[in-house]
Amino acid sequence: MKLMITMLSLFATLINQIQSSRENTIDLYFKAYHSGDIATLEGLMSEDISFKDLTSKVIGQELTLEGKEKTITTLSALFSGVSNLKFKSEFNLISAQFGISAGVISYTNRQSKITYKVVSIVELDRHNKIKRHLEYADYAAALKQLRN
């Protein structure tokens, strides 16, 4: 009986360590993504990451990226066109291998300050790397600011 209790205790500790590692990876990824830290993002992505911005049709193109190289190249180009990038978190949830982050992003783009709401949802693979990233953004609000 004592051996069984010890084994259950060790199993519970292992599960807690795995979940803590997952939470750390997801938290680091969100911080890097919301600050444009490409070097950190690259280390946290799986080679076969799928990145989709499901609301990007509003701005004229659907952003669907497959693979780390294409994702890093595209995100690098997108982040290079902005300055003063800031993110104010309104909600975060990390459970099992999934993470959700919602908040308000703001940046300067060609002398215009742009602010709008975003939601990011990520999923880890079995190696604790980000394998899927879904993005939702209020681009209608961003376009309205650019037109004014």
Image (cartoon, rainbow, N blue to C red):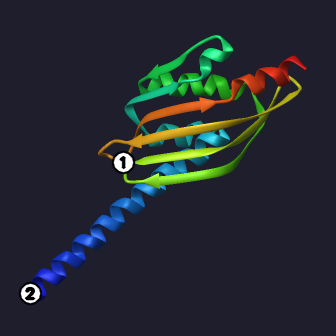
Q: Quadrant of residue 53?
A: top right
**Secondary structure state at the residue bearing disc 1:** loop
Amino acid at the residue labelled 1? Asn
Residue 125 at what x, y percent from top left?
33, 42
Q: Residues within 10 Å of mark 1 (few under 14, many from 20)?
A: some
Tell me the SS state at disc 2: loop
What label sits on residue 1 in the rendered view?
2
Residue at figure coordinates x 29%, y 45% from the top left: 126
- The image's mark for residue 128 is 1
For the residue pair 92 and 24, the one nearer the viewer reads as 92
Q: Position of residue 84 (x, y in %)?
A: 80, 38
Q: Decide: is 131 above or below 139.
A: below
Residue 63, placed above or below residue 107: above
Q: CA distance from mark 2 to mark 1?
A: 34 Å
The residue positioned 55% from the left and 32% from the top of the image is 135
**Residue nearest the observer in this picture, 96 or 108:** 96
Question: In this image, 146 relative to 104: left or right?
Answer: right
**Dot 2 or dot 1, earlier in sequence:** 2
Q: Looking at the figure, which quarter contains the N terminus?
A: bottom left
The label shown at residue 29 is none
- Residue drawn at the location 57% of the way across and 52% of the way down: 92
Identify which amino acid the numbered label 2 is placed on: Met
- Asked whether the viewer can see residue 70, the reply is yes
In the rendering, at what x and y percent does residue 6 appear? 18, 82
